Amino acid sequence: MRRFVFTPFGSRVPTADGTTVISCDGLVEAADLHLSHWDGNRTPLEWKRDTSTESALDYAESRRSPDGESKSSAAELVTNNHFDADGALSIFALIDPDTALAHRALLVAAAEAGDFDAWPSNPRGLELEASIRAIAGPSEDEDAYERVLGSLGSIVTNLEARDDLWGEEWEALHREEELAARTLAVSRHGSITLFEGSFEPRGPILDKRASRDSTRWLTAIDRGHGRFDYRYERPRWAWADTVDRPKVGAPVRGPIVDALGKSFSAKAASGMTAILGTMEPVSLSPRELVSRLLEADAGAR
């Protein structure tokens, strides 16, 4: 038997004798078991995967007997310290394993879309991830879990009919994807995937076009008159402790910024995998910047 309790970030989960505490996604102090891809996790190797959702699904599967019944009657408390799609889906995998395991590919795709800004192999994952955000709305984390976990079962089994949750966002992404297909130039230089266009595409569109083994993404946004804005980053899964996706360590940003000049700053690009960006449009061309980055950043070569 499993139940969920939210544990605010930095707090210890309340424990009870004979109860196994499972920390899904976030790392909660005093948990007995981690099913997580966050740095510092202690997830056992047999359940270690790229997303926390995959870890939770595999754990749930391992706890079932061939007839589908649970192998253990021990009480398990499932917890997390923040709300996002991967967290919600990993918890759902443990509290409703029958539904979750029956829709494994969809759940994993949604977790990848949420945590890695990915265009997953199953694009319906983008719809599910958008649905989770729509249900959660602006709620605080604990309230978001109550809203989402209470709805996930019916949404996962009836996603196509719930375009009231994902339709508008999917249409916007589809329009942007069509624009990128016509106007976004993509090339490879060393380990850098360079994207050149007149707008900054969303993460899933970049992910869909990036070289799978590139360690850096450089987006060049043409502002006209020979001036460009830039965003330089690692692939958007690189913050996580992954198994199948390659590990891409963060560079020391100071020397790279120094080599590029005062128009570039680590503060100009947000996100867990961001390296640097431009403070304002610069006259440096994309190919000139690539050349400088290949000299200044060993991880880009």
Image (cartoon, helix red, strand yellow):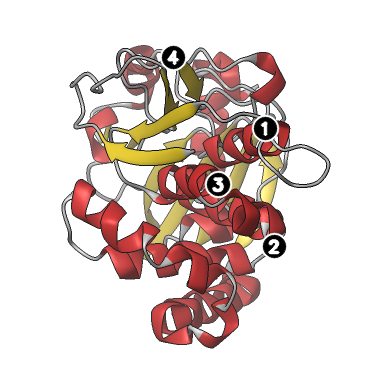
User: Closer to the camera: disc 3 or disc 2?
Assistant: 3
The CA span between labels 1 and 2 is 26 Å
Residues 2 and 99: in front is 2
Q: Amino acid at mark 2?
A: Asn
Question: Image quadrant of residue 6?
Answer: top left
Q: Which residue is mark 4?
A: 32
Q: Is residue 19 left or right of residue 109?
A: left
Residues 138 and 113: in front is 138
Q: Is residue 119 visible?
A: no
Secondary element type, mark 1: loop
Give the class, few, some or many, for how many residues have Cα within 10 Å of label 4's Cα (few <14, many ≥20).
some
Q: Amino acid at mark 3?
A: Ala
Question: Image quadrant of residue 257?
Answer: top left
| Mark toward the start of the polypeptide (1 vs 2) | 1
Secondary element type, mark 2: loop
Q: Which residue is mark 2?
A: 122
User: Closer to the camera: disc 3 or disc 1?
Assistant: 1
The CA span between labels 3 and 1 is 12 Å
Q: Which residue is mark 3?
A: 93
Q: Which mark is residue 63?
A: 1
Q: Amino acid at mark 4?
A: Asp
**Vertical order, 243 against 141 (above or below):** above
User: Closer to the camera: disc 1 or disc 2?
Assistant: 1
**Vertical order, 256 against 267 (above or below):** above
Q: Position of residue 69 (x, y in %)?
A: 70, 43
Looking at the image, which residue sits at the far front? 73
